Amino acid sequence: MGNKVVTFTEQQLEDYQDCTFFTRKEILRVFKRFREVNPELVPKRMTENQAHTIAVPVEEIEKLPELKENPFKRRICQVFSHDGSGNLTFEDFLDMMSVFSEAAPRDIKAWYAFRIYDLDDDMYIGREDLLEATRLLTKGELHQQERDDIVTSVLDEADVDGDGRLSFMDFEHVVVRAPDFLSTFHIRV
């Protein structure tokens, strides 16, 4: 009767369900949001190839209401883009939304939060990463000495092995004790 557009094959939907924390309905909602970012670029029906080759530019993704005020919006996109550019394919976008969903477990969220704060991608959150994070979070309103004091305090409290940087284990130890982490590392679908 109706001319319903089939966005994904049954196999694609099953595969997406297997590798995300979403139901089929949520996957289709995520796709709708992705397509709305750039409807000229993203087709209504995605072939398996297009789902991981058509990439929406980072500048457009950053305009999403959930990201536009986030000081880490560029870094978030870079972490979730398969090539690190920040441009997101549907599969990259789906991964990002899945990790930020309520259903994603704390350890997965902690891993991606760590990656976002590890601004130089060296698998540690070092002094420079923390200084830049502090600058971004305070919109540059603190003096250098104030930022240095904050970073020193964070390292004193969280750097378990005393090497002057946070490993993932150090970071995860802090996150587990943060009661509001799960509610703040979240985007509603």
Image (cartoon, rainbow, N blue to C red):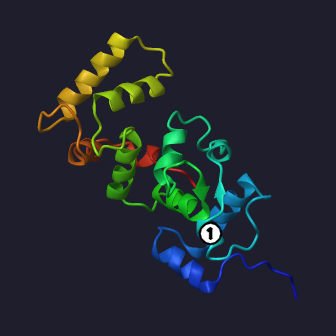
Amino acid identity at mark 1: Ala
Label 1 environment density (alpha carbons within 10 Å; few <14, some 14–19, many ≥20): many
Q: Is residue 22 visible?
A: yes
Q: Is residue 189 visible?
A: no
Front in this rendered view, residue 20 or 50: 50
Residue 161 at what x, y percent from top left? 11, 38
Residue under the point 56% across and 65% down: 91
Q: Say which residue appears at 72% left-offset and 60% top-offset.
A: 35
Q: Quadrant of residue 118?
A: top left
Furthest toward the left, the residue is 161
* Front position in the image: 119 or 6: 119
Secondary structure of the residue carrying tag 1 is helix
In percent of width and height, residue 112 lies at 39, 51
Give the side of residue 9 with respect to residue 16, left or right: right
* Position above or below: 41 against 150: below
**In x, y percent, where is residue 163?**
14, 34
Against 14, is 167 above or below? above
The structure residue drawn at horizontal position 34% and vertical position 52%, both measured from the top left corner, is 111
Looking at the image, residue 39 sits to the left or right of residue 94; the answer is right
Residue 21, compared with residue 146, is above or below; it is: below
Q: Residue at coordinates 52% horizontally, 69% vertically from top-left?
A: 22
Taking the view exactly as shown, the residue that stands out farthest to the right is: 1
Task: Work out which quarter of the rendered image holds the C terminus and state it.
Answer: bottom right
Residue 38, placed above or below residue 119: below
User: Mark 1 = which residue?
Assistant: 51
Quadrant containing the N terminus is bottom right
Q: Quadrant of residue 41?
A: bottom right
Say left or right for 146 vs 68: left
Marks counted in the figure total: 1
Query: Residue 139, position in %: x, y?
Result: 51, 22
